[in-house]
């Protein structure tokens, strides 16, 4: 007897699409049986007809910021674990990995991890979750005593480090010390690669010249700063033979350095996000409508005061050149990109501690705007629409970058990331092309943020 049978769908794996008459039997939240053709009549309490549909493993979004301590000035205006995971599940993501971030003065990670567990369990979550730790002060005690314990006992299999942001950046020696430990333990090391000194120099010049409207954010954080830091991270990794994952890759320059290192058989992995495939910095100049040719009237677009572009401030920024967009698509298509995440890092727009913090002094100042975009719910529908249904990538590649490879990178592959007997029954059903023709709009989303950067983008499919 099964709890649930899903019948007549096509299961998608990284290499294969099953025959259209595939039946899946589920019991106690696990997949227990898969076969071509019917399971016995009356074998289940519940049936779902997936005729004509693709069945993919639940999305795994491994880059989600929720209730993070001091991530940005707007940290209390974003999503909670409850609202963030509600949004995730409504967009077909059944597992998220969020961040527990060390602040410089934290001498131990243990209270931190406990605090994040408390935050996540307070109001419950709608999907499975785990944590990465962000290291900003990697002392010897933390590296040699605490990290192995967190890895072995708490299931924390990944560390993120920043090469940018005054309050968080770590130096090259610290990165090397961290790499030696992640290599030894087999942990994934996520690196936010932007050269902070290059960024700060440009910011100072822009400020001196009174150029502080939101779109200058994209000028300040140049692709060169991303390329330099990416290249440096690759060289450091090469020195100590340690695998690394460059997160939220946004430019042609960074992508090509990663590709070159991969061609030299270095263990360099890459992550990208929907915003770097679909939007250019131009959209920040006034509209904040994502540059999507959406249906907002000229009056609506003109109404904003030039600050709406703050809605699109994230780091790395949206890029100025279409060449960057094309290069990120190429990385998605040719296998350079390992994993596709949202970098969901939301702040409300119309809130004095949210994006509007950038108007505090009475004049728009992009350096005061909390960085980050909401996107955990729109990640999969956007890649299904603009990737699979526009025939840029196959549905197998979609599964690879949204679920299977994320599971492997973060040690979840024994339970998640593919549909097979014994695996968690984290399952998404996609009914065929063209069953939905909609524009994405914030009022249909389930996060607690007052806008989506993808307002007006198409969704020709939505996960069930
Ligand atoms: O703009 C972003 N993504 N801010 C969030 C922090 C980060 O760098 O991931
Ligand atoms: Zn980052
Ligand atoms: Zn992030």
Image (cartoon, rainbow, N blue to C red):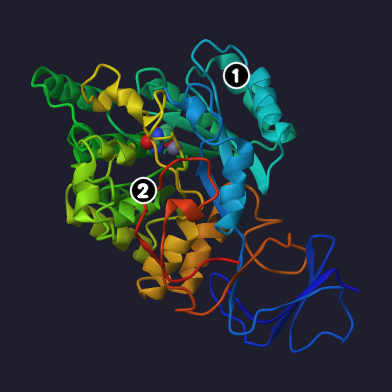
Q: Nearer the viewer, mark 1 or mark 2?
A: 2
Q: Earlier in the sequence, mark 1 or mark 2?
A: 1
Residue 358 point in image, percent of width and height: 30, 25
Q: Secondary structure at mark 1?
A: helix
Q: Which of 213 and 220 lies nearest the eye of the viewer? A: 213
Residue 66 point in image, percent of width and height: 55, 35
**Is 68 left, or right, of 386 in this rendering?**
right
Q: Which of 3 and 19 lies nearest the eye of the viewer? A: 3
Quadrant in which the C terminus appears: bottom right
Residue 305 point in image, percent of width and height: 21, 35
**Is 430 left, or right, of 124 in this rendering?**
left
Q: Which of 193 and 260 lies nearest the eye of the viewer? A: 193
Q: Which residue is mark 1?
A: 142
Vertical order, 27 against 71 (above or below): below
Q: Secondary structure at mark 2?
A: loop
* Res 428 seen here: yes
x 61%, y 82%: residue? 18
**Is 329 left, or right, of 12 in this rendering?**
left
Quadrant in which the N terminus appears: bottom right
In terms of image quadrants, where is residue 132? top right
Q: Which residue is mark 2?
A: 453
């Amino acid at each position: 007897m099964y709890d649930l049978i899903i019948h007549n769908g096509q299961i998608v794996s990284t290499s294969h699409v099953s025959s259209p008459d595939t039946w899946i039997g589920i019991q106690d939240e696990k997949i227990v049986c898969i076969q071509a053709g019917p399971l016995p009549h009356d074998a289940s309490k519940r049936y779902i007809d997936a005729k004509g549909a693709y069945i993919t493993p639940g999305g795994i979004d491994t880059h989600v910021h929720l209730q993070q301590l001091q991530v940005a000035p707007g940290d209390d205006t974003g999503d909670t674990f409850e609202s963030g995971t509600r949004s995730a599940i409504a967009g077909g993501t059944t597992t998220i990995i969020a961040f527990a971030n060390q602040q410089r003065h934290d001498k131990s990670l243990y209270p931190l991890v406990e605090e994040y567990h408390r935050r996540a369990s307070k109001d419950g979550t709608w999907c499975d979750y785990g944590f990465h730790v962000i290291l900003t002060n990697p002392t010897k005690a933390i590296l040699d005593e605490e990290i192995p314990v967190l890895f072995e006992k708490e299931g924390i299999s990944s560390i993120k480090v920043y090469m940018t942001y005054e309050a968080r950046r770590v130096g090259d020696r610290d990165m090397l010390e961290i790499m030696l430990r992640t290599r030894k333990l087999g942990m994934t090391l996520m690196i936010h690669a932007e050269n902070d000194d290059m960024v700060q120099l440009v910011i100072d010049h822009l400020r001196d010249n009174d150029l502080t409207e939101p779109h200058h954010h994209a000028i300040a954080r140049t692709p060169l700063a991303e390329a330099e830091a990416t290249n440096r991270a690759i060289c450091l990794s090469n020195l100590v033979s340690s695998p690394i994952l460059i997160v939220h890759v946004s430019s042609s320059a960074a992508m090509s350095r990663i590709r070159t290192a991969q061609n030299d058989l270095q263990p360099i992995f890459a992550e990208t996000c929907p915003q770097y495939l679909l939007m250019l910095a131009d959209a920040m100049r006034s509209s904040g409508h994502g540059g999507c040719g959406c249906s907002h009237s000229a009056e609506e677009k003109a109404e904003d005061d030039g600050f709406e572009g703050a809605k699109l401030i994230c780091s790395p920024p949206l890029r100025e050149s279409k060449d960057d967009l094309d290069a990120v698509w190429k990385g998605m298509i040719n296998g350079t990109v390992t994993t596709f995440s949202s970098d969901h890092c939301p702040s409300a727009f119309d809130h004095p501690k949210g994006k509007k913090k950038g108007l505090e002094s009475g004049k728009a100042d992009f350096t005061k705007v909390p960085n980050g975009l909401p996107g955990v719910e729109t990640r999969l529908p956007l890649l299904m629409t603009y990737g699979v249904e526009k025939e840029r990538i196959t549905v197998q590649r979609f599964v690879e970058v949204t679920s299977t490879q994320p599971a492997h990178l973060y040690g979840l592959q024994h339970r998640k990331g593919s549909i097979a007997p014994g695996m968690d029954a984290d399952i998404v059903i996609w009914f065929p092309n063209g069953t939905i023709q909609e524009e994405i709009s914030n009022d249909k989303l389930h996060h607690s943020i007052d806008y989506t950067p993808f307002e007006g983008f198409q969704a020709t499919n939505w996960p069930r």
